[in-house]
Image: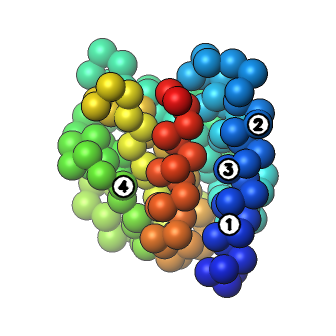
């Protein structure tokens, strides 16, 4: 997908999500809507969902795609790297990521974005693709804007 096409699609999606989630302040309802909209708007999104940081564990919630790992092993894999380093991670090839957790062996690349509330990470948005090198800085920029809508 061309960069300008991707940017324009994300801009339209942000407007759509803003309109949909204004009906509630419930973060789980907002996460569910975000996961569903994103998953169905990009053909390279294979698994799209959130892991919430609860009682020092990353536990799955609100997702679209194949069955997920329910609780992620602590301080291992891309999602925990995001929590530990407090920044978005783009992984071109998950097989080369140290300690990658393969909930579905068909995943080839991944992007994980932190969800912030009151200056603390409370969840992560995790998106997997079956293709290598699916995600870039455009995805990171717009996904960060989208997850900022959850607690707005």
Q: Are marks 4 and 3 in contact (CB under 8 Å)?
A: no
N-terminal label among 4 and 3: 3
Up the image or down, 66 lies above or below 121; here it is below
Label 3 sits on residue? 14
Q: Nearer the viewer, mark 2 or mark 4?
A: 2
Can you tell which of label 4 and label 1 is closer to the viewer? 4
Q: CA distance from mark 2 to mark 1?
A: 24 Å
Residue 148 in view here? yes
Mark number, residue 100: none
Along the line of sight, the residue nearer the viewer: 146 or 59: 146
Name the element at disc 2.
helix
Tell me if residue 39 can be seen. Answer: no
Quick one: label 2 or label 4, which is nearer the N terminus? 2
Q: Residue at x 26, y 46 (%)?
A: 86
Q: Percent x, y for residue 97?
A: 31, 64
The percent position of residue 150, horizontal first and vertical second, equals 55, 31
In the rendered image, the quadrant that contains the N terminus is bottom right
Mark closest to the chain's N terminus, 1 or 3: 3
Q: Looking at the rendered structure, which numbered label has been put on residue 19?
A: 2
Q: Which residue matches tag 4? A: 88
The residue identified by callout 1 is 44
Q: Quadrant of residue 124?
A: top left
At horizontal 28% and vertical 41% (from top left) the residue drawn is 83
Q: How is the image coloured?
A: rainbow
Q: Secondary structure at mark 3?
A: helix
Instruction: Answer few, some or many: residues within 10 Å of disc 2's Cα (few below 14, many 20 plus, some between 14 and 19).
Output: few
Question: Pointer 2 and pointer 1: residues touching (CB < 8 Å)?
Answer: no
């Amino acid at each position: 997908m061309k960069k300008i096409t991707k940017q324009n699609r994300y801009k339209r999606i942000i407007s759509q999500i803003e309109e949909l989630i204004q009906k509630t302040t419930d973060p789980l309802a907002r996460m569910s809507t975000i996961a569903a909209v994103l998953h169905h708007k990009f053909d390279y999104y294979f698994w799209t969902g959130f892991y919430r940081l609860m009682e020092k564990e990353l536990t799955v919630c609100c997702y679209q795609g194949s069955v997920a790992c329910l609780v992620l092993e602590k301080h291992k894999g891309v999602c925990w790297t995001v929590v530990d380093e407090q920044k978005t991670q783009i992984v071109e090839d998950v097989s080369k990521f140290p300690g990658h957790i393969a909930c579905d062996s068909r995943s080839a690349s991944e992007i994980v974005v932190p969800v912030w509330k009151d200056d603390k990470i409370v969840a992560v948005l995790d998106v997997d693709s079956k293709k290598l090198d699916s995600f870039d800085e455009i995805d990171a920029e717009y996904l960060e804007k989208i997850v900022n809508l959850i607690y707005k």
